[in-house]
Each structure stands twice: as structure tokens, then as C-alpha cells.
Image: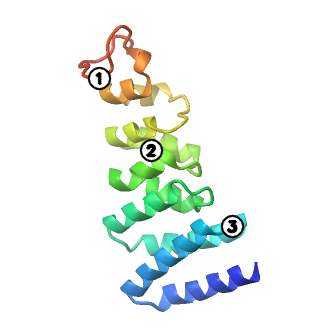
């Protein structure tokens, strides 16, 4: 526990005084340590504060990599996961929306309500999808709706279907 705290303190110092290149290295090092280690919620939160600060300064390609690494992690920092899920780039948000178990359900609903069809399609690929409120359901384009609820169009194959379902 003391080692983790000392490591986080050193990492925070490196973040505040480092170059862009050293901060990127620190991001990947912190992410690797977090994913491979076992930490308390408080320590995970501290990692999240550092990773979150570093993630604000990185390009889309690096955010995509970060999202892909954090999405399957059971100890990914919740604030970082939530921020990545709201990214306008579906390449960043998609892995989190599809796979993260750490994503706050309220953020998931906000994303479903406020983001585009690609984000909704990613949400539809989750292992479990909570029932979407009517306002969100009305926003769904037909391909997204059939991905979420293939039975919405009875007696019609899901692949290659065109047009709105009669149920809406």
C-alpha cells in the first residue's frame, strides 16, 4: 500500500514537471500498472486523477489506445471511463460503450440521449443493455434499433432490412 502511494506521488511529480513525451510515457506506465495491479478504490481513484489529467492532452490515436486498454479492465478509473465514453470520436468512445463494466449508468443514458447513432450502435453491443427510455428509443435509426431489438421487425430478416419498423 505504501509502495503504491509513493509510486503515485512520484508519478504526479513527473506529470506536473515533464515534457509532452515524458507525460505520454507516464500515461502508458500508469495505465499498465493500474491494469496489471490490484488496488483499493482510493488508489484506483488516484490513478484516475493522473491518467485523466494526462488523457486531456493526448491526440485521438492515443485516446483510442487508452480506451481499448481500459474498456475490459475491472479496475479502470470510473471518471476516466466516463470521460472516454462521452468522446465525440466513436473510435474512442466505442470500446468503452461496448465493453466497460465500470461505466456509470447515468453517463451511459446521457450518451444514448445526446450522442449520435454510432454511439447508440456501440451501446447496443453491450452484454447487457438497460431498457432505453422512450425519448431515446425514438432517436434510434432503423439499423441501430434492429441491432438492439432484432424482434422489433417480425418476420423480416435483420440483415439487409430497410425502412422504419411499424412498431414505432
Mark 2 falls on what kind of element? helix
Mark 1 or mark 2, which is nearer the start of the sequence? Answer: 2
Between residues 20 and 126, which one lies in front from this camera angle? 126
Q: Which residue is mark 1?
A: 159
**In the displayed structure, would residue 152 be above or below residue 144?**
above
Crowding at dot 2, Cα within 10 Å, few <14 / some 14-19 / many 20+, comes out as many
Mark 1 falls on what kind of element? loop
Q: Is residue 103 left or right of residue 139?
A: right
The Cα atoms of the two marked residues, 2 and 1, are separated by: 26 Å
Residue extending furthest toward the right: 1
Question: Which quarter of the figure is the N terminus placed in?
Answer: bottom right
Q: Is residue 20 left or right of residue 45?
A: left
Mark 3 vs mark 2, foreground winner is 3
Between residues 150 and 137, which one lies in front from this camera angle? 150
Name the residue located 63 percent from the left edge and 81 percent from the top edge: 8
Q: Answer yes or no: do the residues labelled 3 and 2 have beta carbons within 8 Å? A: no
Q: Which mark is residue 111?
A: 2
Crowding at dot 3, Cα within 10 Å, few <14 / some 14-19 / many 20+, comes out as few
Name the residue located 69 percent from the left edge and 79 percent from the top edge: 4
Q: Answer yes or no: do the residues labelled 1 and 3 have beta carbons within 8 Å? A: no
**Can you see residue 97?**
yes
**In the displayed structure, would residue 73 be above or below residue 122?**
below
Name the residue located 58 percent from the left edge and 48 percent from the top edge: 101
**Can you see residue 88?**
no
Q: Answer yes or no: do the residues labelled 2 and 1 have beta carbons within 8 Å? A: no
Q: Is residue 16 left or right of residue 87?
A: right
Mark 2 vs mark 1, foreground winner is 1
Q: Which residue is mark 3?
A: 38
Amino acid at each position: 500500500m505504501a509502495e503504491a502511494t509513493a509510486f503515485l506521488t512520484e508519478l504526479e511529480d513527473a506529470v506536473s514537471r515533464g515534457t509532452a513525451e515524458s507525460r505520454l510515457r507516464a500515461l502508458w506506465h500508469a495505465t499498465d500498472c493500474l491494469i496489471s495491479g490490484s488496488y483499493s478504490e482510493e488508489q484506483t481513484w488516484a490513478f484516475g486523477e493522473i491518467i485523466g489529467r494526462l488523457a486531456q492532452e493526448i491526440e485521438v490515436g492515443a485516446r483510442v489506445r487508452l480506451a481499448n486498454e481500459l474498456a475490459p479492465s475491472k479496475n479502470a478509473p470510473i471518471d476516466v471511463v466516463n470521460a472516454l465514453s462521452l468522446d465525440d470520436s466513436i473510435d474512442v468512445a466505442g470500446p468503452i460503450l461496448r465493453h466497460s463494466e465500470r461505466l456509470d449508468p447515468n453517463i451511459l443514458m446521457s450518451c444514448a440521449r445526446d450522442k449520435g447513432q454510432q454511439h447508440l450502435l456501440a451501446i447496443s453491443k453491450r452484454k447487457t443493455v438497460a431498457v432505453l427510455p422512450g425519448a431515446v428509443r425514438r432517436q434510434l435509426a432503423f439499423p441501430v434499433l434492429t441491432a438492439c431489438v432484432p424482434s422489433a421487425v417480425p418476420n423480416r430478416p435483420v440483415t439487409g432490412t430497410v425502412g422504419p419498423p411499424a412498431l414505432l
